[in-house]
Amino acid sequence: MSHSDAEVHPTVEEVAADIASMEIRGAATIADAAAEALADQAEHSDAETPEAFRAEMRAAGRHLRGTRPTAVSLPNALRYVLRGMQGSTVEQLRGTVVESAREFQRELDQAQDNLGEIGANRLRDGDTVMTHCHSTDALSCVEKALEQGKEISAIVKETRPRKQGHITARQLREWGVPVTLVVDNAARRYLDETDHVLVGADSIAADGSVINKIGTSGLAVNARERGVPIMVAAQTLKLHPDTMTGHTVEIEMRDEREVLAADEEAEIDGDIGGDGLTVENPAFDVTPPRYVDAIVTERGQFPPESIVTLMRELFGDQQGGEPWEE
Ligand code: RI2
């Protein structure tokens, strides 16, 4: 068997399929699942030589990497775990992969907690936040503010086409937060009642641009026009190292069926044109740094223009090819 035919464990295949279908979604959750899948591959590998083991791990990394292109937390997770693979025997390699996956997962949890504490300090007692999509980093700020004894209300944008705003609404209600759920088109009307727009990020570019769920940039422009501050909660795992050397972030285009899905309530049967109809379904958009007031990370809050300094500190010394490449 050549190295490029190396076996990928069924768990890796399942996790990859679940990420692609968005059964597993949200940048941090994707990163956590990818690290877990690599640990699983290592634990179940029956490779007999270190070379075969390394080839398997690289193949698993490539398989996971190919699922969704925009959230940089995925390659950042794969890099962290695969660069931790050390040793000259299969047992050493296995042990270090599992150990670095666990370490990555612990750091992920810790980073989200620390970020939440920092973000919560921006929220005052009685504030109303407007959310877009579902971000565990953004929700962590609300959770910590509640723990500090502050009363927070939320205006939650539904977030077409997949309506992840409903997940946000459900979580906030579990915490006892008063929630007003609105369709995306109603957001501007409710900005007058909003103290902060609070969103997450899938990737942050070196110039401070924020790549997040489609609709974020329009919301940010409207919020700026109304004088409502825009806060982005994104742990440093969301910083995109390639953008320091001029690369742009690929925006994922998803299936048209997400847009055309039948909806009985709205009398839509999912068939509105047939041939000649083009459907575009970009999952993300880019909010330029001038529309963002603060990027809140576990390392502190930053004006978007200064995020590049943090990126240099974190990624400046990383060189060489990707650890999942042959
Ligand atoms: P956390 C989501 O993307 C949303 O765009 C959200 O803001 C972002 O990931 C970050 O989520 P998708 O996977 O890492 O729903 O903060 O397409 O949980």
Image (tube, rainbow, N blue to C red):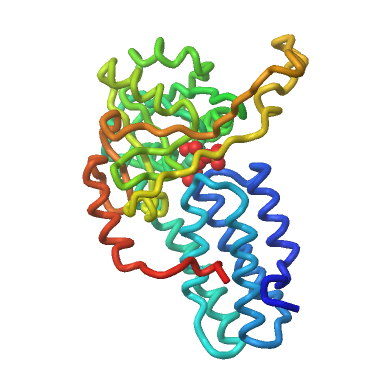
Q: Is residue 91 left or right of residue 186?
A: right
Q: Nearer the viewer, residue 304 or 186?
A: 304
Figure check: 246 above or below 36 = above
Spot occupied by residue 87 in the image (x, y as percentages of width and height): 52, 87
Confirm whether residue 136 shows in the render: no
Q: Nearer the viewer, residue 289 or 278?
A: 278
Spot occupied by residue 223 in the image (x, y as percentages of width and height): 33, 20
Confirm whether residue 12 shows in the render: yes
Task: Name the quadrant of the N terminus.
Answer: bottom right
Name the outermost residue toward the front.
Answer: 276
Spot occupied by residue 14 in the image (x, y as percentages of width and height): 72, 55
Identify which residue is drawn at 28% across, 16% down: 225
Spot occupied by residue 238 in the image (x, y as percentages of width and height): 41, 49
Identify which residue is drawn at 60% across, 78% down: 54
Q: Is residue 44 left or right of residue 320?
A: right
Identify which residue is drawn at 64% across, 65% down: 60
Identify which residue is drawn at 60% across, 80% down: 94
Task: Name the quadrant of the C terminus.
Answer: bottom right
Q: How many marks?
A: 0
Figure check: 259 above or below 243 = above
Figure check: 27 above or below 270 = below
Q: Nearer the viewer, residue 43 or 54?
A: 54
Q: Nearer the viewer, residue 256 or 262?
A: 256
